[in-house]
Amino acid sequence: MAGPLVVSLDAIRTDGWFERVGEGIGSFQALCEIVGARFFAFAMITGARITSLTVDRRIPDNTLVEFAVGADEEAGVAGEPQRLTLGEFRQRLVNALVIDEPHGPAPKRATDLEAVQLHIGVRYLLLAPLYGYALHELRIQSDGSQMVLLHDGLEESYALPAFRARIRTHVREELERIRRPAARSAIDLGRVVEAAEAAERGEHVRVLELLGPWPAPLAIFLRTPEGQMLNPDARATIARGLGLLGTACILLGESSKGEEILRLGIQYAAEGEAAPDLFLRLGEAMLSDGRAGEAIGPLRRAANLGASPARVWAQLAQAFAARRRHLAALGAVLEARAAGAEPRDVAEVVERVRHTLGGAYDRWEEALGSAAE
């Protein structure tokens, strides 16, 4: 009985084909970011040439995709123009790829590479490297063909029909993965308590580990109908988490990123219970970054919403003094003292104003003392 025909697949491996094609496309990176890298690859495999995108940043799935099917630039054929939303376009691509097409018969010779390609299926040769498969060899036996491959560095073996089914499963899962609400899969509100405890201990890196994945999906989720309909408690919890994360980023030296996260937290907080703390954190971050003028707005908003009076007025006093608004600084000092701020919290501001105003400050302090009597 003759042994199996073993065909090396090195000559027809397509590892890195997508990246190589992308080198010749000027808008490659943008298309990958908007459409999704694998979906852009799916479009190439199915022959759908994207001609334009009308991006909907509020609801990304509603982005309009204009594309042509059956285009052949060399033959001068433009193809049939079509337009779908991004969600529909992705569904169309997946539908086309999960149909198990007829395949060519097993090749008779190991050197007949065209027959080998048709037997495996050209689309499977192109899809395989997208999911980490490096095809090694094809073993053709009397009871069917066997694929030997490396998957993420480990050797695996599948009957050819099973290999095709596995690839189709990956394609289906790609659509399911991207349809899954990002916030639901990435956001665990239970982590906020643990993050707050870590922040109390000064473990800012731990806060990043717990909440670091939140901003990107939450920025998208906020613009969806589900995000707009969140109940006040959930919004407040998310806002508190973003406040902790933003402050941790700032304390670890990523000020701009931290402020961006705090602003996202403010959007979730609206005017709810978490809003005063978020505005206070943002104002303090700006003040510590030497942007006293910018800090005044968030700090005033925090004061109006009921943030800790002693803390917020002490911060406002510093901001006003840094902007040389001495009378406003004195007013903030009085508010802070009345709210129970420690003398040391406003001592620097008082000294700066005293130095600047000189005798006028002394007369004001005397008048204030007389009024108190």
Image (tube, rainbow, N blue to C red):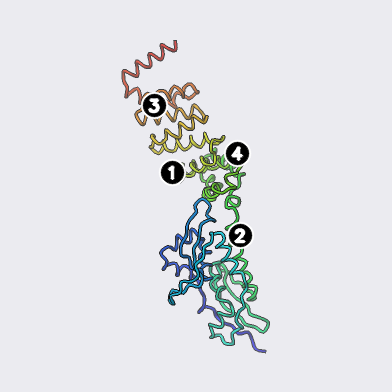
Q: CA distance from mark 1 to mark 2?
A: 36 Å
Mark 1 and 2 residues: CB-CB less than 8 Å, in contact?
Answer: no
Q: Amino acid at mark 4?
A: Pro
Q: Quadrant of the C terminus?
A: top left
Which mark's residue is nearer the viewer, 1 or 4? 4
- Tag 1, which secondary structure? helix
- Tag 4, which secondary structure? helix
Mark 3 and 1 residues: CB-CB less than 8 Å, in contact?
Answer: no
Which mark's residue is nearer the viewer, 1 or 2? 2
Q: CA distance from mark 3 to mark 4?
A: 38 Å
Which mark's residue is nearer the viewer, 2 or 3? 2
Residue highlighted by disc 2:
176
Mark 4 packing: few (<14 Cα in 10 Å), some, or many (20+)? some
Task: Name which of mark 3 and mark 4 comes first in the sequence.
Answer: 4
Tell me which residue sits at (59%, 71%) in the image: 155
Task: Name which of mark 1 and mark 4 comes first in the sequence.
Answer: 4
- Tag 2, which secondary structure? helix
Residue highlighted by disc 3:
349
Task: Name which of mark 3 and mark 1 comes first in the sequence.
Answer: 1
Q: Amino acid at mark 2?
A: Glu
Residue 57 drawn above or below residue 1: above
Q: CA distance from mark 1 to mark 4?
A: 28 Å
Residue highlighted by disc 4:
232
Q: Amino acid at mark 1?
A: Ser
Residue highlighted by disc 1:
255
Tell me which residue sits at (48%, 65%) in the image: 50
Q: Tag count in the figure?
A: 4
Mark 2 and 3 residues: CB-CB less than 8 Å, in contact?
Answer: no
Left/right placement of residue 354 relative to residue 138 reads left
On the image, which quarter does residue 235 sit in? top right
Task: Compare residues 93 and 84 and report the one nearer the observer.
Answer: 84
Task: Compare residues 202 and 25 and report the one nearer the observer.
Answer: 25
